[in-house]
Image (cartoon, helix red, strand yellow):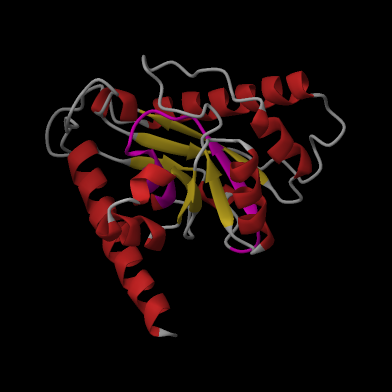
Amino acid sequence: MSPPRLVDATIYYSFYWACFWGFTLGWSFRASGRRNVPTSGPALLVCNHQSHFDPPLVGLAARRPLTYLARSTLFTNKLFATAIRAYGAVPIDRDVGVEGLKAVFKALDEQRAVLMFPEGTRTPDGEMKPLKPGVSLVVKRATCPIIPVGLAGAYTAWPRAQLLPRPSPLFLAPTTRTIAVHYGEPIPPGFYRRMDRDAILADLTARITAAHAEADRLRRK
């Protein structure tokens, strides 16, 4: 292994285990459906977006490193940029614009598992928002399994209007801030190929919503 890859692996696994214990002890983290994420080959994960916690939360139980899109402004600090690159972040200027589409397909061609938040931004009120139209182009052209992912509890733990997150420790009584992730049944390659945009977005929304409901049932309450 070359030195840069060794450095990336060291950063990745250090951050991974810090997140694992931090979210397990601090927010009673639970996950289900892990076997629905293939351990090799290209895969596209699509998840509802609740907080800044979401990328590492989805990655914790995915059984493999994930690649995800991040605003290019997050890469201005060199130290922080090194850390999030090691964790799989790819810089883009827009959410699911042309640049984002190219980044997703490049990562899939490289046999990576890509995480997307098709709402385009964190929910302002805890409710899932309409998916960005551009995501229909991605899933329609994807030649890999598509895994709907649901996240529950992260919004109440760290809403957009709140400066810092509030914990819900494992050793105390559960609260609305406990967190869970559910990976839904994979959608086979080519499933959306002959569907129009509205039908794709409606079906994908329903699957992510169902995964979110499963995650909410899983949470420690």
Total marks in image: 0
The residue at the point 35 percent across, 64 percent down is 12
In the rendered view, would you say 76 is above or below 40? above
In the rendered view, would you say 8 is above or below 106? below
Choose between 134 and 217: the one closer to the eye.
134
Q: Which picture quadrant has residue 78?
A: bottom left
| Rendering coords of residue 65 (x, y %) | 47, 59
Q: Is residue 47 left or right of residue 84?
A: right
Q: Is residue 167 left or right of residue 186?
A: left
| Rendering coords of residue 144 (x, y %) | 72, 51
**Is 48 part of what is drawn in magenta?**
yes
Choose between 164 and 22: the one closer to the eye.
164
The residue at the point 65 percent across, 33 percent down is 135
| Rendering coords of residue 13 (x, y %) | 33, 65
Q: Which picture quadrant has residue 201?
A: top right
**Is 24 part of what is drawn in magenta?**
no
Outermost residue to the right: 194
Q: Is residue 1 left or right of residue 147?
A: left
Quadrant containing the C terminus in the rendered view: top left
Quadrant containing the N terminus in the rendered view: bottom left
**Residue extent of the magenta highlight:** 40-59
Q: Is residue 175 left or right of residue 105?
A: left
Can residue 192 be seen by looking at this rendering? yes
The residue at the point 32 percent across, 50 percent down is 76
The residue at the point 74 percent across, 46 percent down is 142
| Rendering coords of residue 191 (x, y %) | 80, 38
Can residue 177 be seen by looking at this rendering? no
